[in-house]
Structures are given as C-alpha cells and as structure tokens.
Amino acid sequence: MFSKQITTIVFDLDDTLRYSDPHAHNFFCDFAETLGGPFNREQRRAAQRWEHRYWANSDDLLADIEIFTQGSEAFWLNYSQRHLQALGFQPTEAGRLAPVAHTHMRDNYKPVSRVHAETIGALKEFRNYGYLLGVITNRSKPIYSEMYTIGLDLHFDFYLTGSQLGAYKPRKEIFENLVAFTGHSKDELLYIGDNYYADVVGARSAGIEAALLNWNDLYADVDCPSIRSIPELLPLLQPQFVS
C-alpha cells in the first residue's frame, strides 16, 4: 500500500510498458559469449545494472556525449567497449573486440516492439477505477506515432518525452515539470519504471512516490515497492483490488 492518495499513475515507456523482442542486452550478451564467454547469469545481470546506471544521465554518459555525437557510429562503438568491460572483459580486450560487437549489433539486431497482453488489461483496470494515466520517457523525439503503432495511445491521457519536459531522468526537473503539467499535487502522483537509478531515484528526488518494475529480478532488496508485472500494482493501490 502507498502512503498517499494516488490519483495519477505515470509510467516509463521502454522495458516498462513496451519491450523489445529480442532484448538488446540479451542479444549483445549472447554474441559476447562467442567472443570469450561464457558468462553466468549474475555477470549478465551486473552488466545490465551497469547499463541502467549509464543511461540514467551518468557522468560516463555525459562525458561520452561531450566527446562523441550521441547516436553516431563512434558513440555506439565506444558504448560497445564499455558494455564488454561491464561484462568482465579487460579494457585492452574490450577495445579490440568492440568493433566486432558493434558491427554485429548494427547489422543484425532487428527488434520488434511488443506489449504484454496483461499490461493492456491492467491499464483498462486503472481506467475503470478512475486513475489519470500518463507516460514520460527519456526519448528526445515525440512518441505519438509509436504509441499508436503499439496500441497504447488510447490507454493514456498524456505521453511526454524528456525533450518536451525540458529535462531527462533522473533529474528532478523532469518530474517537477510533470507535476506542473498535470496540475495535480505531487502527493497524488505515482511513478513506475524498470530503471531504479533513473525512475525511482529521480521521482523521489522530486518528492513523488515510485515503484520499481523489477520484471527480471534485476534488483535485490530495493527500498521501494517492487513488482514483477504491471498487474501486481493493482493490489498495492487500494484494498478493493485484492480479489
């Protein structure tokens, strides 16, 4: 149960509402194993937590953006090297293998965007109980077209990007601007995401309650409500959701 009376539920998009099939991290790790694995499950999980920290506006990400143009070949080549090191490759070895890993991802990774049927069902339940529903994501471009394509657009009252809100998670400004956009008190908002560093830490920095979608048990002993699927949020909101 949450301590405040929630009226508005806001979700992260990637790996929370929608997921890529196959998942980019798994695809990268599977190939990295052919370069010198095998890696055990915990090494993969540790590398994925590194990914979450990196993309949460980390100092490393900001430094890389200063050196490379984000999204360029050079940026992703450097990212592949960082990713290999996170998996346990020595720096020299990671530098040697990064071009191979980057080329493999660039030429072969063709994911399909999917939404779990149970997620759609839960969103309908939230609607039935009168919750205002929204999405904020660290994307730089509007997501209207994608929300329509994956069938999520009609389930939400708004969906906004970091560029539209003037900041990126985990900076508290994105959440403060979200509060201003909704016109509701921050005490009425609940934020849900899969990245502890960007989503939970970020929302809390602005005084907003947060829950972690820990769908792959990536995090242990977190200091916030943790669920493995969106429907598990229902009984945490109000007692009447418990069947």
Image (cartoon, helix red, strand yellow):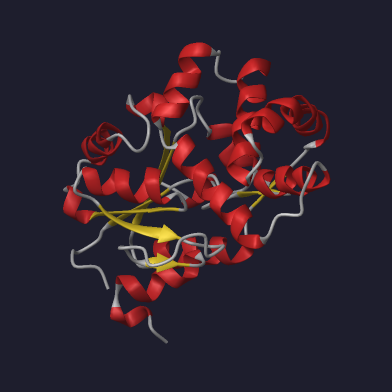
Residue 32, x across and y down, in percent? 75, 43
Q: For the point 65% across and 61% down, which residue is it?
A: 41
The answer to whether residue 215 is visible is yes
Q: Nearer the viewer, residue 53 or 85?
A: 85
Q: Quadrant of residue 87?
A: top right
Q: Residue furthest bottom?
A: 243
Q: Quadrant of the C terminus?
A: bottom left
Q: Quadrant of residue 3?
A: bottom left
In the visual, does 16 lie left or right of 148? left
Q: Quadrant of the N terminus?
A: bottom left
The answer to whether residue 72 is visible is no
Residue 24, x across and y down, in percent? 68, 43
Give the vertical position of 50 relative to 7 (above or below). above
Q: Give the mark count.
A: 0
Q: For the point 34% across and 28% down, which residue is it?
A: 165
Residue 186, x across and y down, in percent? 19, 48
Q: Nearer the viewer, residue 150 or 138?
A: 138
In the visual, does 43 lie left or right of 58? right
Q: For the point 58% across and 55% down, which residue is it?
A: 45
Residue 115, x across and y down, in percent? 63, 54
Q: For the point 30% across and 34% down, which residue is it?
A: 171
